[in-house]
Amino acid sequence: QVQLVESGGGLVQAGGSLRLSCAASTRASSTAVMAWFRQAPGKEREFVAAINRSGFVLNYGDFVKGRFTISRDNTKSTVTLQMNGLKPEDTAAYYCAAGAPFNSRSQSGYDFWGQGTQVTVSS
């Protein structure tokens, strides 16, 4: 069983930055893929980024366009999402996920989810 706890969300002005962290309750190296998803009010949950066990970045969501960077530290069992150039449309609850998906962009492949951390970007 893997428990995930996100932190680092908050309120930021457009153009600002935030750094989200996800702490896993077990050795992160035991999870094949760790990822971030987000969900804005009234919208479906959307893929943000995924990284494999070796630290290789698998995918970014199409909207990222070089603004976000995902990384992981298996010694600390954490995965981090550095978000720069934030826009109001990035406002959402951000969720950490872990699993062994066939398709890293698909929610259905992830077995474990955190409770989410809110990111609000003001214009």
Image (cartoon, grey):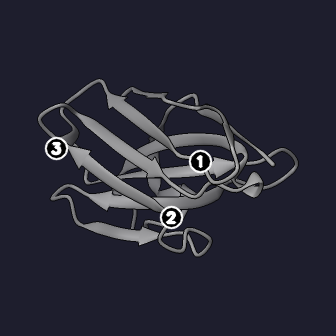
Residue at numbered disc 1: 16
Residue at numbered disc 3: 29
Q: Nearer the viewer, mark 1 or mark 3?
A: 1
The percent position of residue 120, horizontal first and vertical second, equals 72, 38
Identify the residue at image location x=56%, y=51%. Answer: 37
Identify the residue at image location x=36%, y=43%. Answer: 80
Q: Quadrant of residue 56?
A: bottom left
Residue at numbered disc 2: 67
N-terminal-most mark, 2 or 3: 3
The percent position of residue 40, horizontal first and vertical second, equals 77, 48
In space, the residues marked 2 and 1 are separated at their CA atoms by 11 Å
Amino acid type at mark 1: Gly
The percent position of residue 97, horizontal first and vertical second, equals 45, 44
Mark seen at residue 37: none
Amino acid type at mark 2: Arg
Local crowd size for mark 1, using a 10 Å CA cut-off: few (<14), some (14–19), many (≥20): some
**In the depicted view, which residue is nearer to us: 23 or 121?**
121
- Taking the image as shown, residue 81 lies to the left or right of residue 2, namely right
N-terminal-most mark, 1 or 3: 1
Q: How many marks?
A: 3
**In the depicted view, which residue is nearer to us: 37 or 71?**
71
- Taking the image as shown, residue 120 lies to the left or right of residue 42, namely left
